[in-house]
Amino acid sequence: MDIQQTRRKFLKQTALLGTAVPLAAQGLAATPEPAPTPRKTRSPNERLNIGVIGVRGRGQNNLKAVSGENIVALCDVDRNRLAEAKADHPDADAYEDFRQVLDHKELDAIVVSTPDHMHALPVVWGLRAGLDVYCEKPLAHSVHEVRTITELAAQKDAITQLGTQIHARDNYRRVVELVKSGRIGKIARVHVWQGSARPAPGQRVSSSMPPPHVNYDLWLGPAPERAFHPSHFHFRWRWWWDFGGGVLSDFGCHYMDLPFWALDLTAPTTIDAKGHVEYDGENRVPSVMRVDYQFPARGELSPVQLTWYHGSWTPDVHGRRSGVLFEGENGMILANYNTHMVFVGDEKGSVQERPEPWIPSSIGHHQEWIEAIKSRGPTTCNFGYSGPLSETALLGNVSYRAKQKLEWDSKAFKVTNTRDAEQFIQREYRKGWSL
């Protein structure tokens, strides 16, 4: 891999880069949505009425982060988990079905922390109900769902935030400033990788009974009918195509967030994924993967090639199991969640040679969303920004499943070189469910 070459060779082989123009809305909604009713600003001291859908894992962390507001509704298909959350918020109503949360009177906003295959339904229905929305990453399970959500949020003028909480850390802000200031010159090549080991899921079985405290039918939602088995339940759902998208959809929005922000990326024009599954079984996500994305020129800026790696194919760069490497014409920047290094020529550059900081520190990823709801102001990871980011991650999985390189026309919302990818762009919902 070119990423394994010496720093000197890296610098000789780099090309040019630029900035991006915003991705236009594409009009995918099935029926026109009415114009949003302007919502009044609130006093900073006024507490919001929030419903939380999914209360364990990321949901538990998200619930804690917004608990300074009025938590009026809690929802989880696992009654044991729901009872634990209820004990911490005794004044909140508790439901198994997210639709009951949306019917709750005087609700201002919802936090959605369900498995990926259940993101779109509460988010879309919540937006249609006039609610502001915080949703865990990726924004949805399919590219079509993401685009529908992105457009609907814009139509409703909703205050939204994707759960890419690393975006709020100062480290990402300093890297963005370095890149945008031209510290390492123009950038045309980026490498992004995630190397954490993931457990092998258990074997799927033909039939099994769900625990009595779990509403498994509601957990399945629009996903295909599958017999219950612990191998695809709770966190393990992430390793099956029916419910999740593996490491790429899990971490892609976190790590690719940095180059998206720093280089003003939006939609790729080609996506070429390779990989394999290290475990036996049907319908499993790849445990090893490489995806090459090509992003077009944006205004005066030249194209960018971004490569994603995970599993045993991740490169070895200064011992970083996960990271982002920007190759510039004058040097490189290597970053992860918490740290970054600058290289100029063959030597490690002084990070003191940096621009004066201009991106202010975040008040907190969740707090940004809460304060924006009250002021009707902006958020940093609103769905207008994070929708294209989520689409990019999911398109890597589409290319892998279609087993070919994709040519993507984002404006037309279409893969132009094959029809084999259509079934992975938008899948058929289980009977009884629809957006």
Image (cartoon, helix red, strand yellow):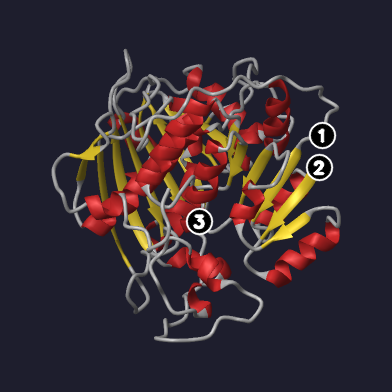
The residue pinned by badge 2 equals 70
- Where's residue 245, x and y in %? 42, 58
Q: CA distance from mark 3 to mark 1?
A: 28 Å
What kind of element bears circle 3? helix
Relative depth, front residue between 179 and 294: 294
Which residue is at a point 47% across and 81% down the rendered structure image?
202
CB within 8 Å, label 2 to label 1? yes
* Amino acid bearing label 1: Arg
* Amino acid bearing label 3: Met
Q: CA distance from mark 2 to mark 1?
A: 6 Å
Q: Give the crowd class for mark 3: few <14, some 14-19, many >=20 residues within 10 Å.
A: many
What kind of element bears circle 2? strand
The residue pinned by badge 3 equals 118
Q: Give the crowd class for mark 1: few <14, some 14-19, many >=20 residues within 10 Å.
A: some
43 lies above or below 93: above
The tag on residue 47 is 1
N-terminal-most mark, 3 or 2? 2
N-terminal-most mark, 3 or 1? 1
Res 145 seen here: yes
- Where's residue 177, x and y in %? 56, 22
* Amino acid bearing label 2: Asn
Q: CA distance from mark 3 to mark 2?
A: 24 Å
